[in-house]
Image (tube, rainbow, N blue to C red):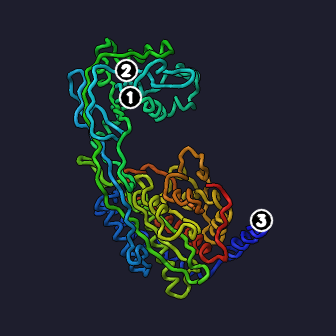
């Protein structure tokens, strides 16, 4: 399309869809109500759903609730022509350490250390370790200079090197340097040298073990590959300073003393230390059942019905805490029971409009994603294996957390009339204009673009399911209320939801969707992925 036609198309989309209030849209928007939201959310975020963790019975129960609602609304099942469920083939890899002894003393995973990595069953024995200071490999400061750690057990200090006036006394770089702030870079550097085992010591490990020790060893979910891949990654044990002292015993120095010596000298203090070590580990693998839930509302315009708008939210959450916790269930009322509720309400409004003869010109796919909390897995699989071609997908409107007042708005005059909007203009200036026009015409909320930036340090643009559409070039809008004190905590409960605010935010999505599915042209993609 040439520039003139592109301009004409843009004008037609914006003015044709949003120039004035549409009384038909206004007739159906009130179906999205606080009362209906409370009805749905009180079920989805109840203790009976056990925090909706992917692969667990609570998530399966939530998927069936959503599918039953889609069916009652008359939405079509389009997976293989007869199902609301798209199977997401997941696999759980759980790294297990079965034994670890150091200088004749046994240590336990989850109490003295925790492991990470992905490796096939293996036993490692060694009669010495290589102490490599901070594990830094920069041009100015290299802990491994002249030292070959191939096949060795290495121990490094995973704790902040000393700074003076914002500059590292060790590397000479400021706190923004990757070597100072990015611990993962040190692990990556050490793994590239092919050691047998990496021991990462620091005082923060004890606190992590105290808070999460009982969850150490829990499996990590990923999308199952067509062929099983070998687990070859060098394993890392994150160890307490007490365990480090046991390993360093034959040096005559403690962890703290060796660290102080490096800090004082400002240069590497790499050395090989006698230490009898034996450890065994393995990665256990099992298949996990999970589904996305799809409900389809076909469009009414023969020329446009093959194009589809996706309205999405993830229905999974983070499950239950171990025995002993006062409140074990992470109900996830806001994250993302609120978004799921919004999708169900919007689906009801569009379904009623269609039954009354005012159905959308384009089709709509209502998509409940699973596995968002595990790494956007459900939306990744859907966008890699779309039921409706992504070339026909005009936009994804993604709703993730719209039921609360975020911490930055608490006490502000507009705390009950705002929403964070992310990504609307990153791929399509048309889409941004449609979203703005829908709000100014109908809901008149404060649309806050604070996080509308790929370089935002919170990285919200990359942290919900819309991103998997965006990376394939599908324009998106992400609606979000911001984090709060109960984010990923058991306190994220139905009693704390602002239902009128949830409904108003969902109405904004409805009006934006109404304009998109009824416009003469789809949003033009004119931005970058």
Q: Residue furthest right?
A: 4
Residue in view at x 40 percent, y 52 percent: 374
Q: Residue furthest bottom?
A: 357
Q: Position of residue 198 (x, y in %)?
A: 37, 29
* Residue 79: % across, % down: 41, 73
Marked residue nearer the N-terminal end (2 or 1): 2
Instruction: Kindly state the secondary structure of the residue where label 3 is placed.
Output: helix
Closer to the chain start, of discs 3 and 2, is 3
**Mark on residue 130?**
2
Residue nearest the observer in this picture, 126 or 229: 229
How far, Cα to Cα, is label 1 from label 3? 57 Å
Residue 494 visible in this rendered orientation of the protein: no
The residues bearing labels 2 and 1 have C-alpha atoms spaced at a distance of 10 Å
Q: Which residue was labeled with disc 3?
A: 3
Quadrant where the C terminus is found in the figure: bottom right
In front of the other: label 1 or label 3? 1
Viewer-closest of 118 and 216: 118
Secondary structure, mark 1, is loop
Instruction: Give the x, y percent position of residue 342.
Output: 47, 68
Other residues around mark 2 within 10 Å, as few (<14) / some (14–19) / many (≥20):
many
């Amino acid at each position: 399309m040439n520039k003139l036609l592109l301009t004409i198309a843009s004008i037609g989309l914006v003015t044709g869809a949003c120039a004035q209030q549409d009384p038909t849209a206004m007739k159906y928007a009130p179906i999205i109500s606080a009362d209906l939201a409370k009805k749905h959310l009180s079920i989805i975020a109840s203790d009976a759903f056990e925090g909706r963790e992917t692969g667990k019975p609570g998530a399966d129960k939530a998927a069936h609730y959503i599918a039953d609602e889609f069916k009652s609304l008359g939405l079509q099942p389009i997976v293989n022509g007869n199902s609301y469920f798209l199977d997401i083939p997941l696999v759980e890899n759980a790294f297990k350490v079965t034994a670890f002894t150091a200088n004749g003393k046994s240590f336990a995973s989850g109490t003295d250390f925790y492991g990470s990595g992905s490796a096939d069953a293996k036993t490692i024995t060694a009669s010495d370790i290589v102490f490599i200071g901070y594990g830094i490999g920069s041009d100015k400061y290299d802990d491994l200079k002249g030292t070959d750690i191939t096949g060795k057990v290495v121990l490094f200090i995973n704790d902040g090197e000393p700074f003076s006036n914002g500059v590292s006394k060790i590397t000479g770089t400021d706190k923004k340097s990757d070597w100072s702030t990015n611990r993962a870079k040190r692990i990556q550097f050490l793994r590239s040298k092919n050691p047998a085992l990496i021991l990462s010591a620091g005082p923060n490990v004890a606190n992590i073990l105290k808070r999460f020790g009982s969850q150490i060893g829990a499996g990590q979910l990923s999308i199952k590959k067509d062929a099983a891949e070998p687990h070859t990654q060098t394993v890392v044990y994150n160890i307490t300073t007490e365990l480090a002292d046991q390993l360093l015993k034959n040096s005559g120095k403690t962890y703290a003393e060796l660290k102080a010596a490096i800090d004082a000298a400002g240069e590497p203090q790499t050395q090989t230390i006698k230490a009898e070590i034996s450890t065994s580990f393995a990665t256990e693998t099992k298949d996990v059942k999970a589904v996305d839930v799809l409900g389809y509302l076909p469009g009414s315009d023969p020329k446009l019905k093959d194009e589809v708008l996706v309205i999405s939210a993830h229905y999974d959450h983070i499950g239950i805490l171990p025995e002993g916790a006062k409140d074990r269930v992470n109900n996830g009322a806001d994250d993302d029971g609120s978004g799921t509720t919004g999708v169900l309400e919007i689906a009801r409004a569009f379904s009623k409009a269609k039954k009354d003869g005012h159905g959308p010109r384009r089709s709509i796919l209502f998509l409940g994603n699973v596995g968002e909390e595990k790494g956007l897995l459900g939306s990744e699989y859907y966008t890699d294996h779309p039921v409706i071609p992504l070339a026909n997908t005009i936009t994804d409107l993604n709703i993730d957390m719209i039921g609360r007042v975020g911490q930055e708005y608490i006490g502000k005059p507009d705390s009950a009339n705002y929403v964070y909007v992310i990504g609307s203009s990153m791929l399509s200036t048309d889409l941004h204009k449609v979203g703005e026009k829908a709000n100014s015409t109908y809901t008149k909320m404060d649309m806050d673009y604070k996080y509308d930036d790929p370089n935002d340090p919170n990285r919200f643009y990359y942290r919900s399911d819309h991103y998997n559409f965006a990376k394939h070039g599908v324009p998106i809008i992400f609606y979000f209320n911001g984090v709060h004190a109960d984010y990923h905590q058991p306190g994220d409960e139905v009693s704390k939801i602002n239902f009128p605010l949830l409904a108003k935010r969902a109405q904004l999505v409805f009006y934006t969707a109404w304009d998109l599915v009824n416009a003469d042209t789809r949003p033009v993609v004119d931005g970058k992925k």
